[in-house]
Image (cartoon, helix red, strand yellow):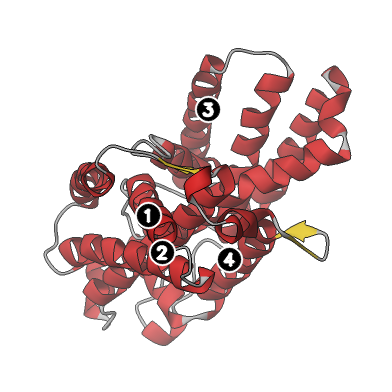
Amino acid sequence: MKSLFQREPLLALMVVALVLAVGIKAPVFLSAPSLANLVTDSTLLVMLALAQMLVVVTRGVDLSVAANLALSGMVAAMLASHHPEAPLFAVVLMAAVTGLVLGLVNGWLIGYLGLPPIVITLGTMSVYRGLVFVLSGGTWVSAHQMPAEFIAFPLTRLFGLPHLVWIAVAAFALFLFIARFTRFGRDLFAIGNAPQCAGYIGIPTARRLLWTYGLSGLVAGLCGYLWVARYAVAYTEVAYGFEFTVIAACVIGGVSIAGGVGSVTGALLGALFLTVIGNALPVLQVSPFWQSALTGLVILAAVLVNARGGRKGSRQILPLHKNQLEPAAH
């Protein structure tokens, strides 16, 4: 626990230092519009990483989030283009419900049938991508086919900040509350630390996994609408490969792939770190192909740090009494 508290301030300092270093090389990076764009660009990754964090602490993984996002976004885009009179709330709700259903499919297969998360979500990732093509017929839904309100909402400003930023802030507060102050959140850390013991002390593991993956799907569905609305286009390969960026944000933020260790703040900082790298490379006129290499190196370094911390006993074994369960990662 102590090492995690030290890790988060260190990661925050690294994010600030990286921003300043890029700003010294390219002062335009520190301009107000550039920083505002940086924050806005991070929002979707932040929300997906927060949901993925809860999945990973249970010793699971959701590789289908980007495919879920693409399918939910296509559903929203096609609904809006074919029924422009439909209220925006109904369109957003449809995207969120679509994502929730897709997530619950994963949760049921993993929680109630006991199938491996990586295998299930890898399979559903391919299925959901295929469904995007089937639903759209391989065609794009472009800006001129979408209602103006549909496109405008994510970047419309409220008290000086885009709706995207406010939604991400609300998501951070919600996930922080779930992880720290609810029995649901405490149970997830208990499952990740000792799955067998969790069952012995009465934690409904199958139900917890069902709704953890459902929550991941719900966030992916909401992000599906926000993604296609912000970029004003929906097509088969939206967010292709983005699931690995989401997982990378969690790992960089200190979420242990072995389960039981992780924090909401860490996932947030990991997402910001990757966003800074992604935005800095074009400013520095570095080839975008280097982004994958740099991200990979950072992930390897984070895994090594996590493994070293685990050997030093940073993971906390939770007590068996259910009333004493506390998250090991806060």
Question: Is residue 296 placed above or below 259 in the rendered structure?
Answer: above
Neighbour class for label 2 at 10 Å: few (<14), some, many (≥20)? few
Neighbour class for label 4 at 10 Å: few (<14), some, many (≥20)? some
**Which of the marked residues, 3 or 4, is nearer the chain's N terminus?**
4
Three-letter amino acid code of the residue under disc 2: His
> Which residue corresponds to mark 4?
171
Q: Is residue 86 left or right of residue 78?
A: right
Q: What whole-number distance in Å separates the C-alpha atoms at marks 4 and 1?
A: 26 Å
**Which of the marked residues, 4 or 1, is nearer the chain's N terminus?**
1
> Which residue corresponds to mark 1?
78
> Which residue corresponds to mark 3?
295
Three-letter amino acid code of the residue under disc 3: Thr
Question: Outermost residue, left direction?
Answer: 113
Q: Quadrant of residue 20?
A: top right
Which corner quadrant holds the N terminus? bottom right
* Tags 3 and 4 touching, CB below 8 Å: no
Res 248 seen here: yes
Front one among 232 and 285 = 232
The secondary structure type at the circle numbered 4 is: helix
Res 315 seen here: no
Q: Residue at x 52, y 61 (%)?
A: 329
The secondary structure type at the circle numbered 1 is: helix
Looking at the picture, how far across and down is residue 112, in whole percent?
15, 69
Q: Residue at x 26, y 79 (%)?
A: 204
Q: Is residue 245 left or right of residue 192?
A: right
The secondary structure type at the circle numbered 3 is: helix
Front one among 136 and 63 = 136
Q: What whole-number distance in Å separates the C-alpha atoms at marks 2 and 3?
A: 41 Å
